[in-house]
Image (cartoon, rainbow, N blue to C red):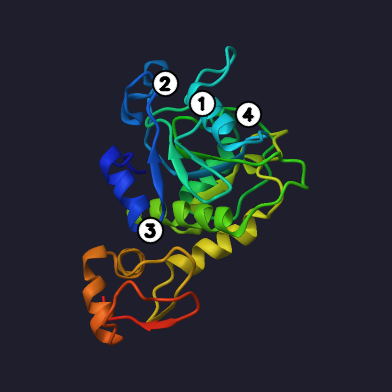
Amino acid sequence: MATPMPYKTFITALRDEGLKVIEEKTNGKPPSSHNRNHKGPWGPVHGVMIHHTVTRGHDHTVNICRTGYTTLLGPLCHGVICKAGHVHVVGYGRANHAGIGDDEVLRAVIAEKPLPADNEASTDGNRHFYGFECENLGDGKDPWPDAQLDAIERVSAAICRHHGWTERSVIGHLEWQPGKVDPRGFGMDWMRGQIRDRLAPSSTYTVRKGDTLTSIAASQLGDGGRWREIADLNDLPDPDAIRVGQTLQLPKK
C-alpha cells in the first residue's frame, strides 16, 4: 500500500528521470486541482497503468484526455505521453482511466507477482493506479517512436522508484480489464524488462537519449544533486557534453 505522492513530488520525480513535463491547465486552473475526487477516493495506490488513446494529433489528444467526453468526463489520465516523448500532465488525483478490473490482477500487482488472466470486472482501478495515456491509434500499425517508448519507461521507473516498487507494478490496460487491448503495438513484458533494467543498481551507466547528469544521478543514485560526483569521477569538464552511448562510472550509493 502507498499513499499517492504529493503533486509537486510527482512533477519533480518525472523531471529528475530526464523527462520533459508540461503542466496543462483546465479553465485556468493547474492540473493539481483537476480530478474526479468527488466521485470517490484516490489511493492507496499500487501501480502504474499504461494506455493508448486511439487518437491522432498532439493537441487533439491532450485536449480529449484533459476534458474527456460527455459520457466520460476528464481527466482521463494523469499524464499524456505524446509521440515526441513529452509528458503532458492533465490532472492529479482520481482520474477516469482504469475503470473496473480484475481483483486477482490487483492482488498480483500488490504482491509483485506474475499476472493472472483478467477475466472479471469487480474492482475500482481509478482508485489504485497512476494512469498514462499514450498518443497512438492502437491499430497495430501506428508507430511507437523511440522517444515515446523511452518516456513510457522513464515515467514508470520514476513512480516505481519513489514508491520502492519493481517493474511488476506496471501493467497495461489490457492486463486489467477484460476486453481491453491497449497498449497495442508493443509488449508489456518487454516494457517491464526495460523498466527493470532502468531501476537496477549498477556501477556504470550507458547514456541514453534525453539523459542529463542530473537525471542519471536521480535515477541511479536516488539524488539528482549528486551529478557533480559523476562529473568529477568521469573527469567531465563540461557536464552538459555527455553523449548517447557513453559509459559513465557511478559513485557508490
Q: Which residue is mark 3?
A: 17
Q: Which mark is residue 121?
A: 4
Question: CB atoms at circles 2 and 1 under 8 Å apart?
Answer: yes
Q: Which mark is residue 36?
A: 2
Q: Residue at x 45, y 51 (%)?
A: 155
**Circle 2: is it few (<14), some (14-19), or many (20+) Cα within 10 Å?**
many
- Note whether 248 is above or below 23 in the view shown: below
Where is residue 166 shown, x and y percent of the image? 45, 59
Q: Hey, what amino acid is under mark 1?
A: Asn
Q: Residue at x 22, y 70 (%)?
A: 226
Q: Which residue is mark 1?
A: 96
Q: CA distance from mark 3 to mark 2?
A: 27 Å
Q: Residue at x 41, y 27 (%)?
A: 94
Q: Nearer the viewer, mark 2 or mark 4?
A: 2
Q: Hey, what amino acid is under mark 4?
A: Ala
Q: Hey, what amino acid is under mark 2?
A: Arg
Mark sitting earlier along the chain (4/3):
3
Secondary structure under the numbered disc 1 in the rendered image: loop
